[in-house]
Amino acid sequence: MKPQTFRGGVHPPYNKDMSIGEPLRKPPLPEKASIPLSQYIGAPCEPLVKKGDYVEEGQVLGKSSSYISSPVHSPICGTVLEISRQTHPTLGQCLSVVVERDREKAPRDYSEQAVDGLSPAELIRRVRDAGIVGMGGAAFPTHVKLSIPAGKRIKTLIVNGAECEPFLTCDQILMAK
């Protein structure tokens, strides 16, 4: 496929065929995880744990009372080694919780949760409590996007499943399931 060019930009070859037929796989768990308490957009979280604490997978590590913010959770079970400034992909450095994985503890088995019958307010609260943020560089809190002004109604829902990076096919594979 010949790349398409235009003034001020380029469309590289997609190269999706390299992975589109491959099954999704779980990556190995890290030995240590550095969890930033800032997600770029929004107020940074205050740590809720301290050095030496044992944390469970999914446990809230930091929270903020600011509206434009989302709590951060531990991706692994283990011991908090430190709370210190660590490298962040867009912020340079920010306060982070460093957790050393407990190799004896098996990862959680996550299951789907029913959302039928929940009020919009309860659904938005659950999204916020889960720390769900956008996958773009800003990590914008999803609960804010879902909070429409009083008196307004959503008429159209657009789900962006486009993968803008060459080689990526995980969204396409998930949507095909």
Image (tube, helix red, strand yellow):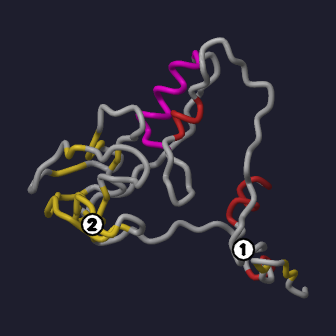
Tell me how far mark 1 sits from mark 2, CA to CA. 28 Å
Residue wearing tag 2:
103
Q: Could you tell me which residue is drawn at 85 percent across and 85 percent down?
A: 3
Q: Which residues are magenta?
A: 119-132
Nearer to the camera, 155 or 123: 155
84 sits to left or right of 77? left
Residue at the far top in the pictured view: 151
Amino acid under disc 2: Arg
109 sits to left or right of 75? right
Please identify the dominant SS of the magenta region. helix
Q: Could you tell me which residue is drawn at 10 percent across and 56 percent down?
A: 51
Residue 109 percent location from the top left of the image:
46, 48
Q: Mark 1 or mark 2, which has the lower sequence index?
A: 1
Q: How many marks?
A: 2
Is 64 a magenta residue?
no
Q: Nearer the viewer, mark 1 or mark 2?
A: 1
Residue wearing tag 1:
22
Give SS at disc 1.
Answer: loop
Residue at the far right in the pictured view: 1
Amino acid under disc 1: Glu
Q: Could you tell me which residue is drawn at 29 percent across and 58 percent down?
A: 105
Few, some or many C-alpha atoms within 10 Å of disc 2 (few <14, some 14-19, many ≥20)? Answer: few
Q: Quadrant of residue 102?
A: bottom left
Residue 29 percent location from the top left of the image:
39, 68
